[in-house]
Amino acid sequence: MLDFSYAFRHKKDFYKENKEIIIKSHKAIFFDRDDTLLHDSHYMYRPEQLEFIEDVFDILKQLQNKDYLLFIVTNQSGIGRGYFSEEQMHEFHGHMLKQLDQKGIKIQEIAFCPHSPDDKCNCRKPSPKLINELCNKYDIDKSQSYMVGDRDSDIEAGKNAGVHTFKVSSENSLQNLLDLL
């Protein structure tokens, strides 16, 4: 007959001794969508509005090769304002993800707030809620992760979530982020 108590004790000791190996957190980059990855043509939901920022494919591929998980965290108030539906946004995102996939780029998940600013929700950036939920779901190590965006609300969301931040501007491109990492 097998001694299961010995096996259980042995297993516990193994996990104690190898905890760092077994519990592995991931590093991640959370991107705003509009004017960070895509040129913003205001309330975008039609596939023909999709236009990636120059060099974004190469930069995302290089970040992925540095073992960063890639996410998009975006406020989509056009839904709350009635300009387009959540279904139309998902179709737009599907078109975007397909183009990224064709370049070998994997976006783990797109987290979005569908509310207008007047709704006073708890998920709209600068709230850290969406980032925190992704960190918990994907076991993200915040100390090795970044929120990247073009607006103050993106940077505040990252700070509120406890991740590093990088603000994209005409003087501070995504290439600069890559150089930083």
Image (spheres, grey):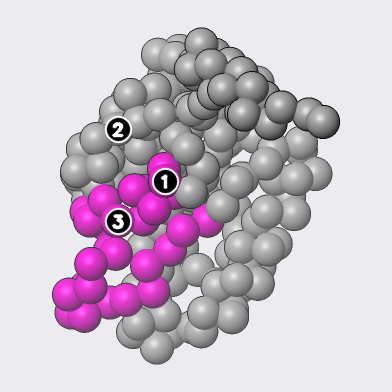
Could you give the CA–CA distance between mark 2 and mark 1, rounded to whole angstroms? 13 Å
> Which comes sooner in the sequence, label 2 or label 3?
3
What amino acid is labelled 2 in the image? Val
Residue 33 x %, y %:
46, 52
Which comes sooner in the sequence, label 2 or label 1? 1
Quarter of the image where one finds residue 124: bottom left
Between marks 2 and 1 in the image, the one whose residue lies nearer the viewer: 1
Compared to residue 96, the image places residue 45 above or below, namely below
Closest to the observer, 98 or 6: 6
**Residue ID for mark 1:** 136
Give amino acid for label 1. Answer: Asn
Q: Is residue 128 left or right of residue 20?
A: left
What residue range appears in magenta? 110-136
Spot occupied by residue 11 in the image (x, y as percentages of width and height)? 61, 23
Q: Quadrant of the N terminus?
A: top right
Count of numbered tags: 3
Q: Is residue 99 above or below residue 70?
A: below
Q: Which label lies toward us, 3 or 1?
A: 1
Q: Which mark is residue 35?
A: none
Query: Is residue 177 visible in the rendered structure shown here?
Result: yes
Measured as percent of width and height from the top left, residue 71 is found at 51, 45
Residue bearing mark 3: 129
Q: Give the position of the C terminus as an image quadrant.
A: top left
User: Which residue is label 2 attached to?
Assistant: 163
Left or right of 18, for residue 58: right
What crowding class fits label 3: few (fewer than 14 Cα within 10 Å), some (14-19), or many (20 or more)? some
User: 11 and 86: which one is in front?
Assistant: 11
Q: Is residue 41 left or right of residue 118?
A: right
